[in-house]
Image (spheres, rainbow, N blue to C red):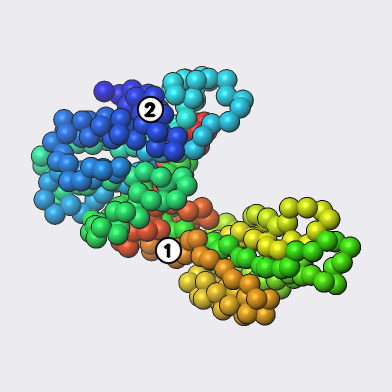
Amino acid sequence: MKEIDILKDLVSFNTIKDKENQKILNYIEQFLSNLGFKTLKKEKYLIMSIGKNPKLAFLGHSDTVDYINGWSTNPFELTEKDNKLYGLGACDMKGAIASFLYALSKINLQSLNSGIKVYITYDEEIGFRGIKEIVENGEIFPQYVIVGEPTDNKIITGCKGLFAVKVYTYGNKVHSSRTDKGKNANSIMIKLLCELENFYESAIKKQINKEFEVPYTTMNIGLINGGNSINSLSDKCDAYIDFRIMNDEHIKKIKEKLDELCKKYDAKYDIDFEILPFFNYIDFIGGQETAGFMTEASFIKTNRIILGPRTSCSS
């Protein structure tokens, strides 16, 4: 079976928000079973293994993002045009799954000195629930894990971390003609965010690590929501803030500043994600690269690399 045929089959499953999760897991399970793999766990995720004492593993997620208007081909039918492949998930990340399955089919698996494991997860695109469940269930990962993501065939050995918080400020709702009688949650949020951003610019952003393409921790105020009328003061405002963390110490410093600001402005915050950055200092021919995006590799405490197909394909 050719690699492109495997990818064609995988793309045909609608796994937006894991819609056909079990169908694609059944396909992958059958493919690997035919090669001699044994199923260790199958729920909304799949774990399979072959051989003794596995030292190598492949990990990939089966879900995809939704497609948007403008597609000229069927998103669930792999289409070749101008020497490129078009299909939803062709790069992210069914292409990597297809490549690994094809590679396994070409190996003499019976002659392995050490075994191989395969992990297929779900909900990577939204909440990382699949990899979180595997980790929380006490899974012991092999010494080396290949995490499939579209990297243009470059080996990625480090990623930034993610610290994402939702901040809440509170006010008293009165008519806008009597601001002296109320308190505006939106105004409080603006002051809080300005102080937080000034702190970030002076205490966080100035620290440089040239191993990253964007060589500093980034801050993004992604969403702000407050008030429901132009002629009244807002009684509640919330803001979603995303930090792509360069080193562990930055999370500690940002937490301390948030604690200080929330006390000052009678606000509060919830942590949505707190994922540490990681580096693998592995000697590869041609060196190693890092990435600013998040992957499931950040949840694994072992030697891991991120590797996948060229993004000239459309996913």
Above or below, 310 relative to 130: above
Residue at image point 87% right, 66% down: 178
Which mark lies nearer to you, 2 or 1? 2
Disc assigned to residue 278: 1
Residue 163 seen: no
User: Where is residue 185 shown, x and y percent of the image?
Assistant: 72, 66
Between residues 38 and 142, which one lies in front from this camera angle?
38
Q: Quadrant of the N terminus?
A: top left
Marks 2 and 1, how far apart at CA: 33 Å
Between residues 59 and 257, which one lies in front from this camera angle?
257
Residue at image point 30% right, 34% down: 22
Above or below, 301 relative to 15: below
Between residues 24 and 77, which one lies in front from this camera angle?
24
Disc assigned to residue 189: none
Residue at image point 59% right, 71% down: 268
Q: Amino acid at mark 2?
A: Phe
The number of numbered badges drawn on the structure is 2
User: Where is residue 177 shown, x and y percent of the image?
Assistant: 89, 63
Residue 140 seen: yes
- Which of the 4 quarters of the picture holds residue 302? bottom left
Mark 2 residue crowding within 10 angstroms, few (<14) / some (14–19) / many (20+): many
Mark 1 residue crowding within 10 angstroms, few (<14) / some (14–19) / many (20+): many
Q: Is residue 117 left or right of residue 15?
A: left
Above or below, 59 relative to 32: below
User: Where is residue 40 shown, x and y percent of the image?
Assistant: 17, 46
Secondary-structure class at tag 2: loop
